[in-house]
Image (cartoon, grey):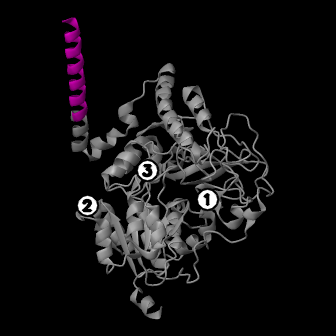
């Protein structure tokens, strides 16, 4: 089968790899019909996440058709069209029982700080991902969800990560009616976080980024205020001034490890890898939120240390909430929102690329060429 | 609340998920306090281990399922095994892993060559997309690359001339 193959920082290609095998009685094999490249894949692509081994296949956002099931799979059957949450979760451990599906303790041997994630380095379990024709899906009784009849496959694939992550970012903000919410980052997750902030009753939504075409996109999609931080002397002062010198009620970091905007952070975090990525967006979020405000983090940072202003967190009494989205918990509500026309996730998809051209797709997305917001890879078998 | 809802009537769905009782953990976590019971849940069937899987020393065993993507091998594998002697809270864990990642890039090129495959770096970096969407950027990259190569060659040839003197 064809599969994306990571060869090193900024180097990927399409290769022939062996068809995946059922390794566990609760496994399924899914024939992929759509997979996305996620903004967090770029952290892997750029070599920022430890234990990203040459030879891996990335891809944690995918949908497909069930081709094969293990002997203990009874919740899905061959031929079902399924969307597969990016978290690999057993549904049985102490953390899954509490709805923390992003923190499953039975899906990742190699780290306790993160649960298993498809195609997301060996730090997230060493699973091959869905940027391929076929993929092994563990815990098939729990994760894969049959796509509701009539749902556009492009909406379905966005439900595997982007929509739940953006939604949970807003949810973790504990937004109260009328609150001012600032979202750092106008990538697909930031766009969705801005859109979902209104669903929790935000009174004002501001998005900060440095790329004009993305700001224009989010302004239209999420009906929010947008600002380019390259046009400011200091984003923190700008935001304080814009909020009557109080600070925002809620700040959302939808950027993570590769934030731009600070040379020292870029050198220590992105180039020398001496901390868990460049934490510029997190610094701005902590420093722009009001006293007693909430910072919600969904941007991905590598382990382990960060030069984070934790003293300010204490002094300001900030609540920080952060997690990988627990997709399975949120799916029923989000499917309802899509079916009712409250959310239109497929509108974020700007590029459809044959799987065979995966290297170009990564470069287009990473270098932000051709006004790219969200690329989708289509395997040859799905194009027939 | 009523007035605000009127103000935002143009935004479809405004406020429909508002939860005034939202506390710092709910609904991220349903409070069942399951974790207080320790490592005592009814574990799923265990995946047979037919390859080497490194596991964090912060847990007593392998997870019930695990990935089989790229088992540790070669020099990078030795470095990874060393890294897994340390906990996830230790630089001794993460820095060797980052080093191993760089070593495995070189191993990957060697493996390619052994199999008679010369990696097409231009294609793997997706520079065809630059040709289509950012020719100026591509020209800059090529120019900078050419200048650096010329400078290095010039420097090396001058050194070798000096050696001959």
Q: Identify the secondary structure beneath mark 3.
A: loop
Q: Identify the secondary structure beneath mark 2.
A: helix
- For the residues labelled 3 and 2, say whether their Cβ atoms are less than 8 Å apart: no
Q: Is residue A363 visible?
A: no
The foreground one among B128 and A67 is B128
Q: Quadrant of residue A75?
A: bottom right
Q: Earlier in the sequence, mark 3 or mark 1?
A: 1
Return the chain for callout 2: A
- The N terminus of chain A, quarter of image: top right
Q: Which residue is mark 3?
A: A277
Return the chain for callout 1: A
Q: Looking at the picture, how far across and down is residue A65, in whole percent?
A: 62, 53
Q: In front: mark 3 or mark 1?
A: 3
- For the residues labelled 3 and 1, say whether their Cβ atoms are less than 8 Å apart: no
Q: Which residues are magenta?
A: B144-165
Magenta segment: does it hold A353? Answer: no
Q: Looking at the picture, how far across and down is residue A326, in whole percent?
A: 60, 63
Estimate the spatial distance between the alpha carbons at disc 3 and disc 2, rounded to whole Å. 20 Å
Q: Earlier in the sequence, mark 1 or mark 2?
A: 1
Q: Looking at the picture, how far across and down is residue B48, in whole percent?
A: 76, 40
Q: Which residue is mark 1?
A: A102
- For the residues labelled 1 and 2, say whether their Cβ atoms are less than 8 Å apart: no
Q: Looking at the picture, how far across and down is residue A9, in whole percent?
A: 42, 39
Query: Label 2: few (<14), some or many (≥20) within 10 Å?
Result: some
What is the chief secondary structure element of the magenta stretch? helix
Q: Is residue B136 visible?
A: yes
Q: Which residue is mark 2?
A: A230
* Left or right side of B49 for A293: left
Residues at marks 3 and 2 on the same chain: yes
Q: In front: mark 3 or mark 2?
A: 3
């Amino acid at each position: 089968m064809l599969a994306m193959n990571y060869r090193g920082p900024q180097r990927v290609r399409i290769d022939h790899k062996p068809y995946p095998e059922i390794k566990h009685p609760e496994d399924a094999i899914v024939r992929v019909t759509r997979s996305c490249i996620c903004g967090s894949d770029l952290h892997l692509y750029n070599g920022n996440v430890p234990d990203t081994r040459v030879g891996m296949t990335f891809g944690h956002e995918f949908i497909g058709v069930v081709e094969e099931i293990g002997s203990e799979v009874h919740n899905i059957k061959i031929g079902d069209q399924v969307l597969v949450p990016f978290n690999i979760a057993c549904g049985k451990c102490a953390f899954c029982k509490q709805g923390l599906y992003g923190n499953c303790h039975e899906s990742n041997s190699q780290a306790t700080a993160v649960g298993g994630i498809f195609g997301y380095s060996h730090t997230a379990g060493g699973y091959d991902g869905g940027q391929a024709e076929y993929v092994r899906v563990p815990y098939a009784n729990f994760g894969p969800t049959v796509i509701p009849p009539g749902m556009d496959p492009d909406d379905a694939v966005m439900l595997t990560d982007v929509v739940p992550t953006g939604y949970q970012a807003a949810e973790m903000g504990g937004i109260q009616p009328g609150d001012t919410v600032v979202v750092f980052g106008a990538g697909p997750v930031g766009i969705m976080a801005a859109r979902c902030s209104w669903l929790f009753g935000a009174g004002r939504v501001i998005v900060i980024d440095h790329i004009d075409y993305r700001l224009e996109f989010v302004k239209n999609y999420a009906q929010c205020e947008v600002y380019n931080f390259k046009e400011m002397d200091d984003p923190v002062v700008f935001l304080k001034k814009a909020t009557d010198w109080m600070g925002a009620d809620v700040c959302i970091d939808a950027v993570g490890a590769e934030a731009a905007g600070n040379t020292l952070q870029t050198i220590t975090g992105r180039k020398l890898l001496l901390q868990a990525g460049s934490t510029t967006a997190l610094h701005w979020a902590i420093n722009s939120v009001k006293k007693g405000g909430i910072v919600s983090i969904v941007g991905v940072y590598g382990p382990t240390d960060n030069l984070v202003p934790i003293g300010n967190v204490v002094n300001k009494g900030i609540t920080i909430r952060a997690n990988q989205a627990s997709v399975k918990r949120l799916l029923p509500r989000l499917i309802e929102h899509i079916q009712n026309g409250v959310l239109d996730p497929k509108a974020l998809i700007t590029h459809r690329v044959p799987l065979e051209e995966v290297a170009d797709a990564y470069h287009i997305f990473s270098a932000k060429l051709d006004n790219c917001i969200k690329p989708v890879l289509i395997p040859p078998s799905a194009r027939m | 609340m009523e007035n605000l809802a009127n103000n935002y009537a143009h935004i479809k769905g405004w406020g429909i998920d508002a939860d005034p009782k939202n506390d710092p953990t709910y609904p991220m976590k349903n409070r069942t306090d399951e974790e207080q019971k320790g490592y005592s849940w009814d574990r799923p069937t265990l995946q047979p281990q037919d390859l080497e899987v490194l596991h964090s020393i912060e847990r007593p065993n392998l997870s019930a399922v695990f990935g089989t993507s790229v088992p540790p091998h070669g020099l990078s594998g030795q470095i990874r095994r060393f890294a897994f002697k340390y906990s996830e809270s230790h630089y001794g864990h993460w820095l060797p892993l980052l080093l191993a990642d760089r070593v495995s890039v070189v191993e990957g090129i060697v493996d390619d060559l052994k199999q008679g495959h010369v990696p097409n770096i231009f294609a793997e970096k997706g520079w065809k997309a630059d040709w289509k969407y950012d020719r100026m950027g591509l020209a800059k990259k090529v120019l900078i690359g050419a200048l650096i190569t010329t400078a290095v060659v010039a420097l090396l040839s001058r050194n070798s001339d000096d050696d001959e003197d």
